[in-house]
């Protein structure tokens, strides 16, 4: 599906969808807790459906309601199926590999589109160290594994995705003796690890955090049932906050001011771009005229597409640094954002771990390719606020990965969209 967006003003209230990061984590924890847990404020995006399916394959009974889940978990992983299909979800595959391997029966992990090329080398190193048999072809998926995860000392670099560490933090408490994760370089994305440890604590699991340099995990721990409501997602709020900086008048609802989400950094990023942030009575809003700045993405790679759009429409020069992990998402978000924005006359240059951007004031009609990346599509849509002509986005259905009703929400704010099959 393609969308054609007519120049339009965006204004109104948006209930920000629930955090995908917290949804994955709560569903997994509840599924490992013997007994009943209820998870509320759930959005059934493709990624979340992948994690639900994966936990069902590992023994949980999960009943879906309109915006909630009733989960009957198991004390340990009980393999109901020997295949786990993560679809296109990086979180699902990296969380589930160590969790599924707390059961030693053979299993195959599947994925689709760009997920099959997203690195899993950290796990391969663990398999080699623990003599766990595995097999793959040229891509990382499908991956066949025969063997169970063993407790011990795990040395993990801190400059790779925190998803690998989160998967181990979920799995290691289920093993029969203690383990330690040693972080061998400065840990990036600390906010995501904070989310993980906070959720694990709610579900009865204790993790000892030694200043993010190492994590001590006692074995033989038991997950406890817990009812949990998912808060609004800061990574999804980024598109609307950027929209406000480009001239929209949008109130963001359902956000938690004291959130642990790493992508809450978007608030400071907006301030760094010269914006003003207000957070009153649960309503988050940004306003201001953007000016160029330097943004460090080491802790928040998912904010890359939205902030690239903001930088391209800001007065002056912006530098994006420590952004190399943007290259290993649904697409290479550095190269793809450069290619798409330059089509519109923007001035974007890439380097190995970042971007240099000189802002312009407006664009005219242009056709963009979303590159099958939900965040690229949503970010580019906000350029309608600075466009004198139609914006066409090819492959716009990819927003279903995290925000299935995004285009309907966009229209509710005054966006004028023509849909093409």
Image (spheres, rainbow, N blue to C red):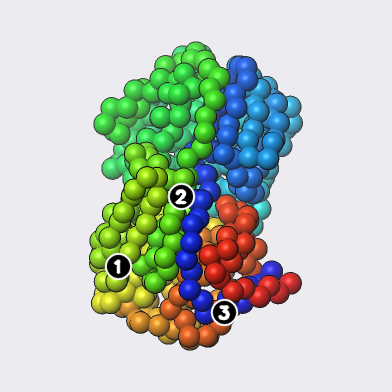
Circle 3 sits on which residue? 6
Q: Residue at x 57, y 52 (%)?
A: 402
**Relative to 128, is 292 above or below?**
below
* Residue at horizontal 48 percent and vertical 15 percent from the top: 221
* Quarter placement of the N terminus: bottom right
Label 1, secondary structure: give it: loop
Depicted 48 relative to depicted 242: above or below? above
- Left or right: where does residue 211 sit relative to residue 344? left
> N-terminal of the two: label 2 or label 3?
3
In which quadrant of the rendered view does residue 99 lie? top right
Q: Percent x, y for residue 309? A: 41, 70
For the residues bearing labels 1 and 3, Cβ distance under 8 angstroms: no
Q: Residue at x 40, y 83 (%)?
A: 362
Query: Mark 2 packing: few (<14 Cα in 10 Å), some, or many (20+)?
Result: some
Task: Please indicate, yes or no, whether residue 102 appears anywhere in the rendered image.
Answer: no
**Numbered mark located on residue 288 in the image:** 1
Mark number displayed over residue 253: 2
Q: Residue at x 64, y 68 (%)?
A: 395
């Amino acid at each position: 599906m393609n969308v054609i967006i007519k120049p339009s003003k965006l204004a109104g209230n948006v209930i920000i969808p629930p955090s995908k990061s917290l949804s994955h984590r709560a569903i997994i924890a509840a599924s490992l807790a013997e007994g009943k847990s209820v998870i509320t404020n759930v959005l059934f995006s493709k990624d979340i459906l992948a994690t639900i399916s994966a936990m069902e394959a590992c023994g949980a009974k999960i009943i879906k309601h309109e915006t909630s889940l009733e989960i009957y978990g198991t004390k340990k992983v009980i393999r109901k199926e020997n295949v786990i299909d993560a679809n296109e979800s990086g979180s699902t595959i990296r969380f589930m590999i160590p969790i599924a391997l707390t059961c030693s029966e053979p299993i195959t992990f599947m994925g689709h589109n760009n997920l099959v090329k997203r690195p899993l080398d950290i796990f391969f190193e663990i398999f080699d160290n623990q003599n766990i048999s595995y097999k793959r072809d040229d891509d990382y998926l499908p991956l066949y594994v025969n063997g169970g995860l063993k407790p011990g000392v795990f040395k993990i670099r801190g400059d790779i995705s925190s998803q690998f560490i989160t998967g181990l933090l979920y799995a290691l408490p289920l093993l029969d003796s203690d383990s330690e994760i040693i972080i061998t370089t400065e840990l990036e994305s600390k906010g995501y690890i904070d989310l993980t440890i906070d959720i694990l604590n709610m579900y009865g699991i204790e993790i000892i955090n030694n200043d993010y340099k190492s994590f001590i995990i006692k074995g033989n721990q038991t997950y406890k049932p817990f009812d949990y409501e998912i808060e609004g997602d800061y990574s999804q709020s980024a598109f609307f906050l950027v929209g406000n900086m480009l001239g929209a008048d949008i109130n963001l609802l359902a956000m938690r001011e004291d959130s642990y989400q790493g992508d809450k950094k978007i608030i400071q990023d907006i301030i760094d771009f010269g914006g003003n942030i207000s957070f009153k009575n649960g309503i988050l809003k940004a306003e201001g005229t953007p000016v160029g700045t330097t943004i460090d993405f080491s802790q928040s790679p998912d904010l890359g597409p939205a902030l690239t759009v903001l930088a391209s429409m800001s007065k002056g020069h912006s530098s994006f640094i420590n952004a190399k992990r943007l290259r290993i998402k649904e697409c290479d978000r550095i190269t793809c954002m450069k290619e798409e924005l330059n089509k519109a006359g923007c001035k974007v240059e890439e380097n190995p771990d970042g971007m240099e951007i000189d802002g312009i004031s407006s664009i005219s009609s242009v056709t963009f390719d979303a590159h099958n990346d939900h965040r690229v599509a949503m970010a580019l849509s906000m350029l309608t606020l600075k466009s004198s002509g139609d914006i066409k986005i090819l492959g716009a259905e990819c927003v279903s990965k995290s925000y299935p009703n995004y285009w309907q929400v966009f229209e509710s704010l005054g966006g004028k969209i023509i849909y093409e099959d």
